[in-house]
Amino acid sequence: MNKVFIVDIHSNPSLLRFTEAKVFFNAKNEGIDWAYDCVTVQSIDEITEDKGIVINSGEFVSTMFRSKHINVNTLVDARGHPDLIQFTADYEYNMRKPPPYAILSKQKYIIENLYKVAIRSKNLVYLDNTEEYTEPSATPHHFYGLASGWKSVQYVKDFGIHNLESITIYDLCQRQLDYQQMLHSLPVLPDTVDISAPTCGDYNPPNDIRDFWPQWHNADVNFVLLDLYTSPVFPDNSFVWVSNAFKYEPNIFKYGWQYCKTAKENLIFNNKSSTIVNI
């Protein structure tokens, strides 16, 4: 993967945040493993590293461009490259008014897709998980897991429900938290659920989760609203599953990449005795 340097030529914070978000997500809002980091500079002269890709703020990295620069070994000054899609600085990228692009333009398609995701994310319920599950090797005393999908329940199952002193399911989205609390109140998982949009994925509980559900239902589980960006401090020897909260497109678009990176670093620093798991 690459490190991307963004020359902030526009002094437009919302355009910069948009550019940062789109380094890590494509036009369809799918996460792409093309860049591992991006850094903002005011001039290319500030860059002291000899490997990476340089673009301007307001330049969208297209699929064509990525295919030509999969993993660079030198410092590539790509500013103005014909495969980069240009976005104007004469607009605030904050969803208050329609973007000033032609109806069938690539720019309009890209920015409106991002707006839709940013709006949906506030009330979005994940019915399953978009990432693979890896069985944990830790032996924690306390578990904190996101309310999305089945992954938190899977972790508790593998840790051994009686080996944990406390179990906490958390989320920033009240609707997601309410959904998971509703399921926990049921002694047996239903075949279907009646839930309104927006949702992501399908309701299809794995067989081992169905079998485990009576134990989960009887477990003492705390359900709490929690913002990881406030750097909460967890009890010693906690296992905390944070998923992609610090590399989540709506968050990068809202806060900027550096803010998200710092929030993650602060969370880890404030919880040195705990295990923080991203995936």
Image (cartoon, rainbow, N blue to C red):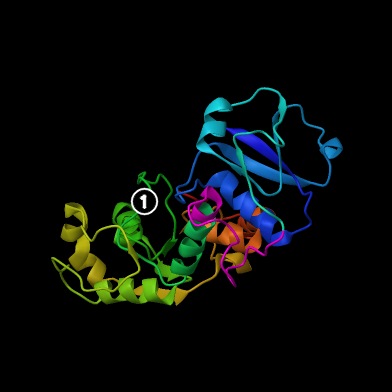
* Residue in the foreground of this view, choosing between 78 and 233: 78
Residue 18: image location, x then y, percent: 62, 55
Q: Would residue 31 appear left or right of 231 to someone viewing this image?
A: left
Q: Relative to residue 181, is residue 67 depicted above or below?
A: above
Main SS, magenta region, reads loop
Residue extent of the magenta highlight:
90-109
Q: Would residue 162 appear left or right of 76 to someone viewing this image?
A: left
Residue at 51%, 63% (x, y): give it: 115
- Residue type at mark 1: give it: Thr
Residue at 54%, 39% (x, y): give it: 62
Which residue in the protein does label 1 denote?
130
Q: Relative to residue 45, is residue 101 depicted above or below?
A: below
Q: Secondary structure at mark 1?
A: loop
Residue at 66%, 22% (x, y): give it: 73
The magenta stretch spans residue 102: yes
Which quarter of the figure has residue 259? bottom right
